[in-house]
Image (cartoon, helix red, strand yellow):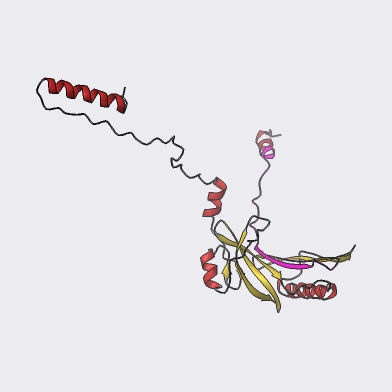
Amino acid sequence: MTSSPTVAAAAALILAAGANFLGASPVVAQPEPIAPSLDLPNAPSAPLAPTVHQQAEATAPVPKVELWRGAMLGMTLDQVKALFATGVAPYPAPVGDDGAVALWRMKDQVYGRDGDLYFLFRNGGLSSVMVKLRDVKSHATLGNLEDARALETAFSGYYGKPKVCFDSKTGGLDQVDCRWQGHGLRIGLSYQDFGGSSPYMVIAIRPVPPAPKAKTPFFGKRARKGASAS
């Protein structure tokens, strides 16, 4: 059993007193240092290990896909900053529906229309681009619709017929919502205006996700294995 520092110190004093009594030079035993306990409130803790899903995302090869004017899928924020030095960090930073965060913003144009372009990042790499058109005016529904349809025509001329496209004026809601796919990208154009007071037009550019792997039903495999030959 290891004695406590207090007990060790007391024993040292007793030994010293006995040594003096016998006429020998006293040798005082030094108490052993106390090792820091990991149970202390300020003890450093090990960082949380990444999940298997996070590890797979971090190590998966990034396909060579150009998202915007030389900005490639998977680029770091520093690489995007070097490519577009006139940009700034947006505040507040918009967050995409997939959890990606916009960390760099700059002014640009889409077919001659001014917009604020946001670079969104996930797991440290560029994952998508979003453009909010700036020349969308309140109570100018006809002009806004013309711009949205002109963009629809331009995108269709480059990417082909949209996969899906809604162009409607129903119940006071003016809407153009189209999706294209081509050149390794998915492009979305969304214009909405309810009543003319708060219109918006957004273009989203993302990589085409990998095709899901086909899976054979478990019970189907089992049934084939257990089937008897006729």
Question: Which residue is nearer to you in this view: 72 or 162?
Answer: 72
Q: Residue at point 54% right, 69% down?
A: 81
The residue lying at 42 percent from left, 36 percent from top is: 38
Task: Pick whichever, 144 or 198, lies toward us.
Answer: 198
**Above or below for 95 versus 202:** above
- Say whether residue 156 is visible: yes
Q: Position of 41 compared to 184: left or right?
A: left
Which residue is at the front of the view, 91 or 204?
Answer: 91
Viewport quadrant of the C terminus: top right
Q: Which residues are magenta?
A: 195-221
Taking depth in this image into account, of 65 and 200 the one nearest to the observer is: 200
Q: Position of residue 44 (x, y in %)?
A: 44, 42
Dividing the picture into quadrants, the one containing residue 39 is top left
Up the image or down, 221 lies above or below 86; here it is above
Q: Which residue is found at the position 27% from the left and 25% from the top? A: 8
Query: From the viewer's perspective, is 171 left or right of 102?
Result: right
The quadrant holding residue 5 is top left
Q: Is residue 215 left or right of residue 16?
A: right
Pinpoint residue 218: horizontal percent, then vertical percent.
66, 39
